[in-house]
Amino acid sequence: MPLSRRSVLQGAVVSAAALAFPSRADDLAPVYAEIRRRHDETVKRIQQWIATPAIAAESLNSEEGVQQFIGLLKDAGFQSAARVPTDGKPGVFALLDAGAPRTLGLYFMYDVKQFDPREWTSPPLEGRLVDKPGFGKCIVGRGAVNQKGPEGAFLAALHAIRGAGRKLPVNLVLVAEGEEEIGSPHFPQIVRRPEVMQALSRCAGVEMPSAAQSADGTLEITLGAKGVIEAEIVSSGEKWGRGPGKDVHSSLRASLDSPAYHLVQALGTLVTADGVDPAIDGWFEKVKTLSPAEQQMIDAAAKHLDEAQMKKQFAVSHWAHDLPFREALARLAGQPTVNIEGLVGGYTGQGGKTVLPHRAVAKMDFRLVPDMTVPDCLAKLRAHLSKRGFADIEVNMTGGYDPNTTPADSSLIRAETATYRKAGLDPILWPRGGGSWPGYVFTEPPLKLAAGHFGVGHGSGAHAPDEYYLVESTNPKLRGLDDAVRSFVDFLYQI
Amino acid sequence: MPLSRRSVLQGAVVSAAALAFPSRADDLAPVYAEIRRRHDETVKRIQQWIATPAIAAESLNSEEGVQQFIGLLKDAGFQSAARVPTDGKPGVFALLDAGAPRTLGLYFMYDVKQFDPREWTSPPLEGRLVDKPGFGKCIVGRGAVNQKGPEGAFLAALHAIRGAGRKLPVNLVLVAEGEEEIGSPHFPQIVRRPEVMQALSRCAGVEMPSAAQSADGTLEITLGAKGVIEAEIVSSGEKWGRGPGKDVHSSLRASLDSPAYHLVQALGTLVTADGVDPAIDGWFEKVKTLSPAEQQMIDAAAKHLDEAQMKKQFAVSHWAHDLPFREALARLAGQPTVNIEGLVGGYTGQGGKTVLPHRAVAKMDFRLVPDMTVPDCLAKLRAHLSKRGFADIEVNMTGGYDPNTTPADSSLIRAETATYRKAGLDPILWPRGGGSWPGYVFTEPPLKLAAGHFGVGHGSGAHAPDEYYLVESTNPKLRGLDDAVRSFVDFLYQI
């Protein structure tokens, strides 16, 4: 869910950074030339990757997807790239030993989100090059920005370095999964293998390639992410022992309990009376308040961001509790949440149907902040429901992970900042992304590595129709594919 | 929704009625012979009718359906059968003047419920004759019992009388609609036309053909029906002015209100803390308690019905409030309800999706008992929500009607009872069906007519896959098509 990592700060230009690409050490000039020379090859590689969507939720193409990805890694110079079986879809563990003193960890995903071609203006698996007014030429396709475009740009950096006859300045340890879009349920099975743990423990940090520029050119470095529990909360007559055990005619409601109403009442207990904040027993026990340094980052962001534009972007007229902007931003970094993603029960078609359903489901997500943990929160949620007469309600976790935090002074973050600055871009530091990714497997014990996302460039529409990744920018604030590839080259030399 | 009319009393044989068809006045023997002679013709007519499904919810075939139905009426001897336009799908007003002293009103529907052929074991529009173990040969198809089979059997009675050279003993005034399955929103526009009102005002009552036998042979005469409001209760960021105006990433929940949670909280206020009874302000103000005569009917039913079998049928282990059987039955007749038919909001597909939806909908039905009325209850519901901070929540009524009541001593009900008894069947009187039908347009002022459902025979699966109507019974408790047609002949002579 890397898109969400940036969602907080879309909406405002922070500063008019110098946009000219500064001069560089001469020795990388042949590499940059190689990037330009290989531009079409890079575009084609991304398009071919888009053509095969691996979708874990639909058990679609995961085997094809992992094999194709392994091929891409070997082409890019990885000496080994092994399929790693899990209880779900397979992952990948790959090594590129450059004989360098330092080693960088990489986290990749080869899966993409579901899509409905009827909602797209060009075929989602074609990766067509489309002129997008105000942006430039873009690859449009499922996975274009999330994450095949940026990952493809990273691999292009490896091709360019090798193509220019250079040796890679760092060794690479790559772990990848095909279940990112379903909440990475088996990713720990990949990372926790002894040989993977050993390789990762040598790393200076773990990076995921991204297209970090928002539509307005804003660039954000996020020092961690909230955790998340995604779960289906299910009420059924079967489990409850009340109400019908199958859908019956709604006239019977006069003498029967309603599992759908049972769900509604259970959900009602999870939030405060105004519907905003978590009200689960003990939910805030382990919540760490934002540190003075994090508060300063929020102060800075609140000054620079355009509140009106953010509200317009989300079609919002009031923040929760009618909070001022600065406090709304602070909550995005520091507040746990209880959210209904979806409600499904009984008759969901057109019009009505006089049925008393035996089952109803709420798809929920719960965002966690340090030091909340998934097992502790799941236990608290279940205890809360039981105490209020909802012990029968099922809490079926479908994915999720603990929050993660990376220090601002880690070498990884310092290299990110330095590389962006060299590229003439001015990144904003942000304490914690509101979205989630499984960085905790790297940042938490025993590995305790820095972890983050990096990459010049822009794209949008992850999880939505017409997802795109900018290839040739006509917008002075945004960088295209070649600049993205160059940023990965620079980052590899910086770290 | 005539199926539901019987749902209360399915489950027990009330008494071992003599099942031999008793001898009749000799003068109807040629009519009965004609019924048998025309058996195949009747089956074929029903099958041809099933082949064209008019589905108002899908705006499918309504024009074809009304024209086909008008043809069926003219074939059966109606001198006039006019298409009646409405703001929705067209209705029909038809007259058969037999020069008789008495006139009977008829209520027909030509529409059927939606269906999904993949769920059926034979094609739903074929009306295939299928041997159903324990029942006999049945027509299987959408509309087989709801309501083309019984209506076709009624028309067959007219064909048989005319075919035997007899004159119809009563005049007929028929009103029909093509929107019964969406709650009859425009049926009053048909009935309230001056020429229709005038014709109906001469009627001894209004009858709808049905297949009144439950699977166990039980036969019920219902003296009215609850009313109903079907409505979509909608919460949206746009109307609320809080939360997002479009679906946004769920990480934003930390600083945004949730329209889905707003809906959950609004729904919570509509029922008591245990989730069972309506808690809408003033909801019980106009509720009439059951009369002593109605209480006696319930006493009698409670003695005769098999509670264990009913619970098994609905997969239920407890009645609401753990009530004893007799009180559970009384509530089916006398208690208003608040029911969630369906919940739809945000992401409803497989797994989860990290979205904060801008809109969520509860499909609801509210059953009304005398003397509640639709406009009064709608106003109370809206006032209740407004008072609690939910003024923005939309209450979009999609269909419904007031409750209706017909006296047990009306000539219509007496004719029903007498005809069933002559056929060797022992009907149970039941004060009020838990399901609903638009009988109020007949029973309430200004018409104040008796209204009911009548017909020997059996079928089931209305609104479900493999809907069927019994044609040739192998079950000694159940009657087939020819007996159904005969019951309509007898009823016409009885009234």
Image: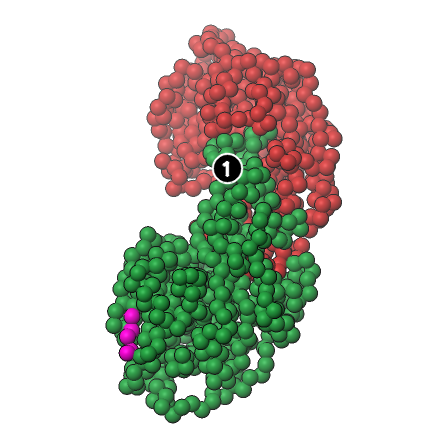
Chain colours: A red, B green
Task: Tell me where the magenta segment starts and ends, as one range.
Answer: B95-99
Q: Is residue B25 left or right of residue A252?
A: left
Q: A196 or B52: nearer the eye?
A: B52
Please state the horizontal and vertical placement of residue A152, each as a whole percent of the image: 48, 28
Q: Residue furthest left?
A: B79
Q: Is residue B366 visible?
A: yes
- When the figure is inspected, residue A135 is found, relative to residue A401, above or below; the finding is above
Q: Is residue A355 left or right of residue A413?
A: left
Q: Is residue A260 visible?
A: no
Please state the horizontal and vertical placement of residue A313, each as a whole percent of the image: 47, 26
Q: A371 or B12: nearer the eye?
A: B12
Where on the picture, by quarter, is residue B168?
bottom left
The residue lying at 59 percent from left, 66 percent from top is: B291
Q: Badge 1, how many Cα within 10 Å: few under 14, some, many 20+? A: some
Judged by its main secondary structure, the magenta piece is loop
Please state the horizontal and vertical placement of residue B60, each as a whole percent of the image: 34, 56
The mark tally for this picture is: 1
Residue A194 drawn in magenta: no
The residue lying at 56 percent from left, 30 percent from top is: B256
The residue lying at 30 percent from left, 68 percent from top is: B94
- Mark 1: amino acid: Asp
Provide the secondary structure element on which disc 1 rests: loop
Quadrant of the image containing the C terminus of chain B: bottom left
Q: A263 or B375: nearer the eye?
A: B375
Which residue bears the numbered disc 1? B392
- When the figure is inspected, residue B469 is found, relative to residue B366, above or below; the finding is below
Where on the picture, by quarter, is residue B111?
bottom left
The residue lying at 48 percent from left, 68 percent from top is: B406
Protein chain holding label 1: B
Please state the horizontal and vertical placement of residue A48, each as a whole percent of the image: 42, 34
- When the figure is inspected, residue A55 is found, relative to residue B188, above or below; the finding is above
